[in-house]
Amino acid sequence: MGKDKLKKWEENKSFAHVFEPNLLPIIKEGKTFMKGEWRSKFYKNENPLVVELGCGKGEYTVGIAQRELNKNFLGVDVKGHRFHKGAKDSLASGLINVAFLRARIEFIEAFFAENELDEIWLTFSDPMPNDHDGNRRITSGYFMKRYAKLLKSGGIVHIKHDNPGIYERALIEIPQMGGEVVLHDSNIYESGFLANVPSELKEVLEIRTYYEQMWLNEGRKIKYIQAVMPLKK
Ligand SMILES: C[S@@+](CC[C@H](N)C(=O)[O-])C[C@H]1O[C@@H](n2cnc3c(N)ncnc32)[C@H](O)[C@@H]1O
């Protein structure tokens, strides 16, 4: 075990905005954690709740939270030593609308109630090319159906990725599950796309995550999808 990881895990325990529940009772016994209680117990307001799933170092969570102080942000990742950076950065910036949760997306319903979320960001999620059923690929139609229940009626999902397979499959699978793709582009920095979106979205899309920077250095093209989940009756 690297000393650096241990230090980050130890430091995470001291942060009031980092939640690292024991995952065993959640996985084995169906226990829940903070489900339906994020606003009342942590943020102490009724503002929209935006989550980044597989947030890594939390660049999107912190980056958007700085620009949109009237929304609550939660970065979720199974690796606490990764979001330790976002936890430290948000603390250093004095942000009170940011938190991080160590969890597995496979058990997402243990952490959020129906209609609790307003937006979901999926940034450079693991591509899982051999996951044909989509039950490990967190951008799949299978996961979109589950997210739709947790999102308010007409909630938004954002996908930012370098992988053409992820992009193309999401463009097929989102309409199949009843969602509507409202914006999409396969090469956002070079196609002129950013010049035609509202300036707030342009600014947010220009945030570069750790993985994004790696893929950009290799010359990969960055893609974006914005989808509205099915309206609830
Ligand atoms: C390729 S990285 C992208 C990280 C970050 N979004 C970025 O753009 O730099 C994928 C992240 O998703 C996390 N992850 C993958 N599968 C997960 C799962 N099932 N539940 C929670 N986190 C997961 C990994 O730990 C990793 O930090």
Image (cartoon, rainbow, N blue to C red):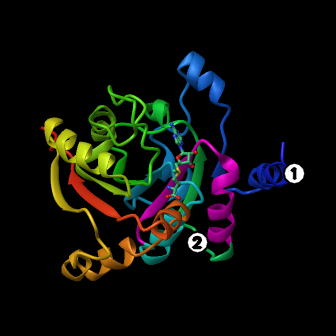
Magenta stretch encompasses residue 76 = yes
Query: If the image is split into quadrants, where does the N terminus sit?
Result: top right
Question: What residue appears at the point 30 percent right and 74 percent down from the top-left corner?
Answer: 201
Query: If the image is split into quadrants, where does the C terminus sit?
Result: top left
Check disc 1 and report the residue beneath it. 3
Magenta stretch encompasses residue 146 = no
Can residue 17 be seen in the rendering of this structure?
no
Question: What amino acid type is highlighted by mark number 1?
Answer: Lys
Question: What residue appears at the point 62 percent right and 69 percent down from the top-left corner?
Answer: 90
Q: Which of 5 and 62 is in front in this view?
A: 5
Total marks placed: 2
Q: Nearer the viewer, residue 63 or 196?
A: 196
Instruction: Check disc 1 and report its element: helix, strand or loop.
Output: helix
- Measured from the top left, where is residue 231 in percent x and y? 15, 44
Residue 67 to residue 56: above or below: below
Residue 107 to residue 187: above or below: above
Question: What residue appears at the point 26 percent right and 78 percent down from the top-left corner?
Answer: 194
Residue 51 to residue 179: above or below: below
Q: Nearer the viewer, residue 86 or 173?
A: 173
The circle on residue 30 is: none
- Which residues lie in the magenta part? 70-91
Between disc 1 and disc 2, whose residue precedes?
1
Q: Which of 144 and 127 is in front in this view?
A: 127
Q: How crowded is mark 2: few (under 14 residues within 10 Å), some or many (20 or more)?
A: some
Q: How far apart are marks 1 and 2 (CA)?
A: 28 Å
- Measured from the top left, where is residue 224 in percent x and y? 29, 61
Report whether the residue tagged 2 is closer than 8 Å to ligand 1: no
**Left or right placement of residue 216 versus residue 166 in this view:** right
- Measured from the top left, where is residue 14 in percent x and y? 78, 55
The circle on residue 95 is: 2
Can residue 121 be seen in the rendering of this structure?
yes
